[in-house]
Image: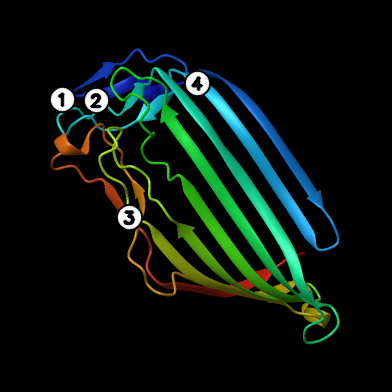
């Protein structure tokens, strides 16, 4: 359902009412969730057929209106989470080494659109993956290394003329829950983008990049950052 900001858009130098339609669609979804002694998984497969999907993009710098109805679109993909305890009792009894994987596959596209054909919907990367390698002991100590990987960036425009560059980010997380009188207190550390990689984290989509002059489109991702602190649970 379009909200007030979608319906009351700035076109030229004036605000105008834009008669947007309500988006409608049908979705089919199937999934599985389970756990065994050392393995767990959560997987969902879905497909949505949508009419009048509300999309945000800039036509040109002279047309600030930003929300439009697509004709027909197809949104389909996979959401997968899997984890395996690959090694137990490494240093002492009660510790383990775990490998976890998250994968989002998004195949979002137009369906025989009169302008964009079967092009992909801009702003949505096709694959997003996170791999976590974690060591934990007695549920109090946890140290994990993370790898965030976007192997193919999202399209910047609906004409599909340019993609955002791929990137890989490395991080480390650690936490320790204190005992005794300090029970409930957890010390934590979260270090992100350790290689200080320059990357594009998001985009403002446009209709066609070839005609979108003097338009700011790219949002830079955060550089190397380290967060440390204390959490108290009661």
User: Is the residue marked by circle 4 packed among few (<14), some (14-19), or many (20+) residues within 10 Å?
Assistant: many
Secondary structure under badge 1?
loop
Residue 140 in sight? no
Q: Is residue 70 above or below residue 107?
A: above
Considering only order in the chain, which callout, 3 or 1, is on the residue closer to the N terminus?
Answer: 1
Residue linked to disc 1: 13
| Distance CA(mark 1)–CA(mark 2) | 7 Å
Screen quadrant of the C terminus: bottom right
Considering only order in the chain, which callout, 4 or 1, is on the residue closer to the N terminus?
Answer: 1
Q: Quadrant of residue 116?
A: top left
Residue linked to disc 3: 165
| Whether label 1 touches label 2, CB < 8 Å | yes
The tag on residue 50 is 4
The tag on residue 36 is none
Secondary structure under badge 4?
strand
Q: Which residue is drawn at 43% across and 64% down?
A: 168
Query: What colouring does the structure picture have?
Result: rainbow
The answer to whether residue 185 is left or right of residue 125 is right
Considering only order in the chain, which callout, 2 or 4, is on the residue closer to the N terminus?
Answer: 2
User: Is the residue marked by circle 2 packed among few (<14), some (14-19), or many (20+) residues within 10 Å?
Assistant: some
User: Is the residue marked by circle 1 packed among few (<14), some (14-19), or many (20+) residues within 10 Å?
Assistant: few
Task: Give whichever of 180, 139 is nearer the camera.
Answer: 139
User: Is the residue marked by circle 3 packed among few (<14), some (14-19), or many (20+) residues within 10 Å?
Assistant: few
Q: In which quarter of the image is residue 230?
A: bottom right
């Amino acid at each position: 359902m379009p909200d007030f900001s979608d319906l009351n858009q700035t076109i030229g130098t004036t605000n105008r009412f834009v008669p947007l339609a309500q988006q409608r669609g049908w979705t089919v979804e199937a999934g599985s969730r389970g756990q065994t002694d050392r393995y767990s998984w959560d997987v969902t497969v879905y497909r949505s057929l949508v009419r009048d999907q509300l999309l945000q993009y800039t036509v040109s710098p002279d047309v600030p209106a930003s929300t439009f109805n697509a004709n027909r679109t197809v949104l389909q993909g996979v959401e997968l989470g899997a984890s395996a305890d690959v090694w137990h009792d490494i240093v002492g009894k009660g510790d383990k080494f775990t490998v976890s994987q998250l994968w989002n596959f998004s195949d979002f596209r137009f369906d025989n659109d009169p302008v964009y054909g079967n092009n992909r919907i801009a702003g949505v990367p096709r694959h997003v993956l996170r791999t976590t390698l974690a060591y934990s002991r007695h549920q109090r100590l946890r140290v994990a290394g993370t790898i965030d990987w976007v192997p193919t960036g999202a399209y910047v425009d609906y004409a599909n003329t340019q993609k955002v560059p791929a990137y890989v980010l490395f991080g480390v997380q650690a936490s320790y829950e204190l005992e005794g009188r300090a029970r409930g207190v957890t010390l934590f550390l979260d270090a992100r983008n350790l290689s200080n990689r320059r990357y594009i984290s998001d985009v403002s989509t446009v209709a066609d990049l070839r005609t979108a002059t003097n338009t700011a489109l790219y949002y830079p991702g955060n550089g190397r950052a380290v967060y440390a602190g204390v959490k108290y649970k009661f």
